């Protein structure tokens, strides 16, 4: 038997080319050519139960699930008898949502002044008790991941893997949901005591994220060979850290022209 290479025949990531050189009465002369499979294509699907964190908001009030799909391309090279290292890049789309619900009532006062019927300025303080508040927005982003991965074979059909990398996101669209607020407003000086329910959908411009966002991530996983030497099922679990803020609520005007702030009572329109 004439053989070439350093891999074993049972290596699931090696292509073995067999050539029969000659055939005798009791034996065959065979040439084995071992070629490591280098090029890789990965189809990805990911889910995160919480992808956003907000400052100044009770964590229990915020829900932000996300899903992503994409395709990665790369090359893997031998890094020892049972290890390989690879470099990958890809492209994908992420669908996420940001859902806020008030966690418990909130009270505050709003003070202003206006002229009465005699033309004199009168102080007015409106006391609010917000009993419920909710708003939501859905995002769609394109992303490009670049990462380094190390694979370690632990059996004929199993590999452990680790990767480290970075992602660049580009926001394509923001789709706002309804902004709903309910509660009571009281003002002793003007005999005001009413319950209100406000519903409004704000423009996409208010919820628009930064055009580009960047993050760093790391994962650990287990790869299972499904189709011998050709297809793997790869499971990953990890953490992604946002390097840049994605959305600042103060960066855009909260109200449009000729519209009042939705939570502050407007004495010019007592029925709104």
Image (tube, grey):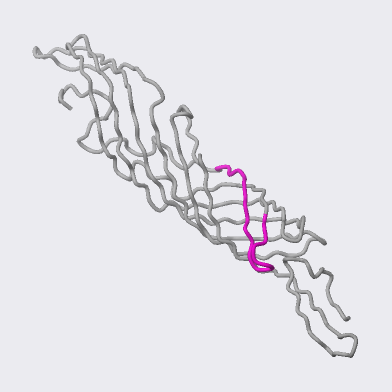
**Residue 238 x, y percent position in the rendering:** 62, 45
Quadrant position of the C terminus in the picture: top left
Q: Main secondary structure of the magenta part?
A: strand
Q: Position of residue 151 (x, y in %)?
A: 72, 56
Residue 40, image x, y percentages:
64, 66
Residues in magenta, as a range: 223-242
* Quarter of the rendering occupied by the N terminus: bottom right
Residue 222 in the image, given as x and y percentages of width and height: 68, 52
Query: Residue at (89%, 85%) from the top-left corner?
Result: 27
Task: Looking at this view, name the residue that lies furthest to the left.
Answer: 118
- The image shows residue 1, relative to residue 117, as above or below, that is below
Residue positioned most to the front:
25
- Say left or right for 148 vs 28: left
Residue at 76% in and 75% down: 16
| 99 relative to 211, above or below | above
- Identify the residue shown where x is 69% and y is 51%: 162
- Which residue ends up furthest to the top in the rendered image? 188
């Amino acid at each position: 038997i004439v053989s070439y290479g350093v891999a074993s025949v049972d290596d699931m990531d090696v292509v073995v080319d067999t050539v029969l050189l000659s055939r005798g009465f009791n034996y065959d002369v065979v040439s084995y050519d071992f070629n490591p499979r280098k090029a890789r294509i990965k189809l990805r699907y990911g889910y995160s139960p919480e992808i956003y964190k907000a400052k100044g908001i009770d964590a229990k009030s915020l829900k932000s699930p996300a899903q992503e799909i994409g395709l990665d391309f790369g090359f893997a090279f031998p890094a020892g008898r049972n290890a390989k290292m690879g470099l990958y890049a890809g492209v994908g789309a992420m669908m996420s949502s940001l859902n806020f619900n008030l966690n418990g009532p909130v009270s505050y006062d709003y003070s202003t002044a206006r002229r009465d019927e005699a033309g004199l300025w009168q102080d007015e303080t409106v006391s609010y008790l917000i009993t419920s508040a909710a708003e939501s927005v859905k995002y769609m982003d394109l992303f490009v991941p670049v990462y380094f991965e190390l694979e370690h074979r632990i059996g004929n059909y199993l590999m452990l893997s680790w990767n480290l990398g970075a992602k660049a996101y580009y926001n394509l669209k923001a789709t706002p949901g309804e902004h709903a607020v309910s509660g009571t407003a009281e003002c002793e000086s003007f005999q005001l005591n009413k319950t209100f329910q406000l519903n409004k959908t704000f423009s996409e411009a208010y919820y628009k994220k930064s055009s580009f966002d960047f993050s760093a991530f790391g994962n650990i996983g287990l790869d299972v060979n499904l189709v011998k030497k050709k297809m793997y099922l790869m499971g990953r679990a990890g953490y992604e850290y946002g390097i840049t803020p994605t959305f600042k609520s103060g960066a855009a005007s909260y109200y449009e022209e000729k519209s009042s702030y939705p939570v502050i009572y407007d004495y010019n329109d007592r029925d709104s």
